[in-house]
Image: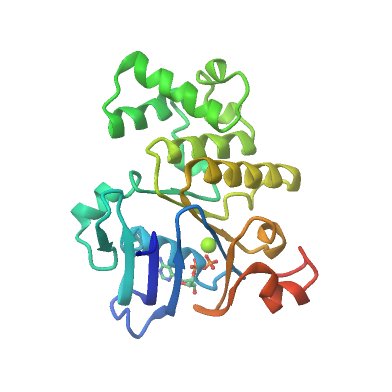
């Protein structure tokens, strides 16, 4: 059986000479459906570049994959090497099979439009729903991420929602296509601690409901120790430690929450 995601010997660089300007130096990991991999490391260690390489958004930031494979099992059962796939195929996979959420939900939402419109748009685009159907789907999506009074909230504009609520909206949008893999790049870093825990618990529940694979990126090991099946600790573009959360010596030896 192939894994949902199998990254091997991944090298990524930037600029005119990406081999000379390499920032990710041969990392590898696997992820199965329903599993959570936490990628942990200090700022600048290569977590985001790794995540953005998986869905190849790294290309749009001037990055280039210079070596390795990113084998991803599609819903059809076919395995595709995302590291070598043409942009046309990647565009179809992004959003549909691989969802992504970022640290700053505000940057991904349009301040001019009500959130309901923006979620409904995703259902129009990806599922061909129209008018009322798309709005109904948007309400369901908000309910799925436990936003109370969802029908009323549809009319809210992004600036009328708290950071935690906005992140829920982003999660709802990312899940609107039922992705098989969700990449969450520090989705709780900008939130206060209580809200962080709520969002984390929500992601964990949603993952269990849908059997999707979750890659959760954070600089805070303490945050993910409880929900991760696997941890990869990155430093200077390398995986310096990999394993089950309880086996990682870095996690055992460092006082939780004080690291990085
Ligand atoms: N668009 C870019 N152009 C050039 N270098 C970049 C770019 N994005 C990231 N890097 C470099 O890659 C390294 C890893 O960055 P990143 O993956 O964003 O770190 P992290 O997410 O762990 O904080 C850093 O040295 C950073 O400066
Ligand atoms: Mg980052």
* Relative to 64, 244 lies left or right: right
Residue pushed farthest right?
255
Residue 63 seen by the camera: no
* Percent position of residue 243, x then y: 59, 73
Residue found at x 39% / y 25%: 120
Residue 249 seen by the camera: yes
Choose between 6 and 66: the one closer to the eye.
6
Residue found at x 69% / y 57%: 226
Residue pushed farthest bottom?
20
Residue found at x 65% / y 44%: 201
Quadrant in the picture for residue 8: bottom left
* Percent position of residue 200, x then y: 64, 47
In the rendered view of the protein, which quadrant contains the C terminus? bottom right
Position of residue 155 relative to residue 24, above or below, is: above
Position of residue 235 relative to residue 49, above or below, is: below
Choose between 81 and 194: the one closer to the eye.
81
Residue found at x 25% / y 62%: 80
Quadrant in the picture for residue 143: top right
In the rendered view of the protein, which quadrant contains the N terminus? bottom left
* Percent position of residue 255, x then y: 80, 70
């Amino acid at each position: 059986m192939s894994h949902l995601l199998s990254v091997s010997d991944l090298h990524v660089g930037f600029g005119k000479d990406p081999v000379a300007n390499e920032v990710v130096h041969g990392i590898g990991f696997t992820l199965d459906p329903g599993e959570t991999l936490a990628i942990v490391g200090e700022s600048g260690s290569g977590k985001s570049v790794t995540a953005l390489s998986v869905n190849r958004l790294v290309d749009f930031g001037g990055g280039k994959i210079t070596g390795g494979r990113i084998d991803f099992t599609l819903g059809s059962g076919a395995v595709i090497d995302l590291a070598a796939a043409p942009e046309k195929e990647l565009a179809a996979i992004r959003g549909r099979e691989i969802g992504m959420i970022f640290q700053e939900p505000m940057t991904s939402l349009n301040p001019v439009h009500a959130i309901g419109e923006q979620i409904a748009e995703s259902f129009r685009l990806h599922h061909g729903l129209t008018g009322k159907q798309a709005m109904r789907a948007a309400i369901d999506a908000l309910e799925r991420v436990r936003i109370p009074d969802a029908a009323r909230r549809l009319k809210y504009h992004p600036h009328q929602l708290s950071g935690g609520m906005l992140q829920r909206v982003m999660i709802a949008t990312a899940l609107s296509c039922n992705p098989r893999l969700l990449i969450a790049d520090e989705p709780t870093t900008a939130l206060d601690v209580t809200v962080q825990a709520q969002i984390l618990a929500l992601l964990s529940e949603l993952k269990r409901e849908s059997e999707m694979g979750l890659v959760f990126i954070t600089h805070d090991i303490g945050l993910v120790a409880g929900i991760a099946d696997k941890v990869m600790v990155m430093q200077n573009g390398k995986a310096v430690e990999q394993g089950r959360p309880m086996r990682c010596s870095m996690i055992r030896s460092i006082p939780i929450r004080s690291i990085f």
